[in-house]
Amino acid sequence: MYGGGVNDRRTHPPVSADTGDVQPLDPGQLEAYFVLLEAVSLLQHQVEQQLRAEGDITYVQFQLLARLVHAPGPLTMTQLADGVVYSRSGLTYQAGLLEKNGLIARGPCPDDDRATLVTLTQAGSDLFRRVLPGHVEVSRALLFDPLTDRDVHHLGDIMTRVRDHMRTLPPRSAAPRKRRTTPS
Amino acid sequence: MYGGGVNDRRTHPPVSADTGDVQPLDPGQLEAYFVLLEAVSLLQHQVEQQLRAEGDITYVQFQLLARLVHAPGPLTMTQLADGVVYSRSGLTYQAGLLEKNGLIARGPCPDDDRATLVTLTQAGSDLFRRVLPGHVEVSRALLFDPLTDRDVHHLGDIMTRVRDHMRTLPPRSAAPRKRRTTPS
DNA sequence: TATTGTTATACTCTATAACTATA
DNA sequence: TATAGTTATAGAGTATAACAATA
């Protein structure tokens, strides 16, 4: 996903720019979509405040640490990036910050001399464990409080399917021809 | 929301979290939370590609246009910012871009000489209508495809409650004391 | 040749603070 | 004094392209 063809995905052309003939989503769907993004945006903003305040890290960095925490072992840069950062240089930048702060360490990869293996340091692990409770607390106060257990379960189920769907969808490497020009 | 609390420098004390006595969420909840953010992050990334490609606008700008489209009339800057941009200057910046591109117009407010009324131009309205179908198409392909009608309905319901909950929650002025865990 | 990762660079966006002007 | 908005500016983050090294 990160060296991939995110950039030239033409998502959906065939439909003319006319609002006319695109069978629109029904209002309920569109509404659900907007509310989803809005709510998550609000949530994300608060979460970032908490991470900044308690651990002085961004959400992106938190995600990278989380991936390492949950991984069975060191990850290559590419593996680490997956779904979190969308450009190689962006990841190098973030990894540089984390390394500078002693939260991760980078070393050679025995299997592949091109690759870099990223390891979580003790400090990184400690930091993650230190900010997690507050993180959890924010998400509970903001996200789970107004929800029943069934809601949460259903939400998790729904978003898992969506996530998996999205992960399989874009061929991510197809590098489809550019074509697309003629800005009419 | 934007004059609310973000502007005063302390930004931090979000929902606050004492690392001490936090009942952790059960794993299912935590999982739901992470998957939610992950899925939305992927979705957002694709959506941004589409908006950039078809309308040369960012998602923030799209949201601002959307607010104007759905508003009964012109909005003040503060009203426009609500939930979309979290600092006054950030909004001025975005509004400046939109105005430069002829998508909105700013003018005086009869009721309050301090305020600025923001109006959607014809070009702004046109652009919004032009990118909406593709936008809808992306969200359908990525978000709604793997979901049943019931899922979508439930999702909308859930996120609406969450959104409303968050909007009422943080009094954003309480300014609880710092209570830094930082030694010295 | 393709892939892994880094670097250099330009650009976008955000946020703090200082400022103007109204209420 | 408090609020609405702008400006100046600094800094964080991202992406593109060029690069080196390895597969």
Image (spheres, coloured by chain):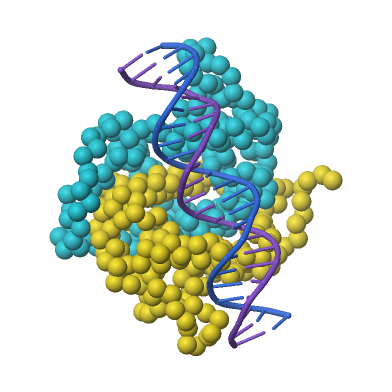
Chain colours: A cyan, B yellow, C purple, D blue
In the picture, the quarter occupied by the C terminus of chain A is: bottom left
Vertical placement of A56 versus A113: above or below? below
Confirm whether residue A125 shows in the render.
Answer: no
What residue appears at the point 37 percent right and 42 percent down from the top-left corner? A163
Q: Position of residue A91 (x, y in %)?
A: 51, 34
Q: Residue furthest right?
A: B184
**As rendered, which of B139 and A18 lies closer to the eye?**
A18
Vertical placement of B158 versus A168: above or below? below
Vertical placement of D21 versus B11: above or below? above
Q: Position of residue A68 (x, y in %)?
A: 55, 30
What residue appears at the point 33 percent right and 72 percent down from the top-left corner? B121
Q: Position of residue B73 (x, y in %)?
A: 37, 80
For the image, the number of numbered tags is 0
Vertical placement of A142 versus C4: above or below? below
Q: Residue furthest left?
A: A21
| Image-based side of D2 in relation to B32, left or right | right
Q: Position of residue B2 (x, y in %)?
A: 55, 67
Image-quadrant location for residue B88: bottom right
What residue appears at the point 43 percent right and 38 percent down from the top-left corner? A86
Confirm whether residue A41 shows in the render.
Answer: yes
Image-quadrant location for residue A180: top left
| Image-based side of B96 in relation to B130, left or right | right
In the picture, the quarter occupied by the N terminus of chain A is: top left
| Image-based side of B58 in relation to B148, left or right | right
What residue appears at the point 24 percent right and 58 percent down from the top-left corner? B133
**As rendered, which of C9 and B71 lies closer to the eye?**
C9
**As rendered, which of B140 and A177 lies closer to the eye?**
A177
Image-quadrant location for residue A3: top left
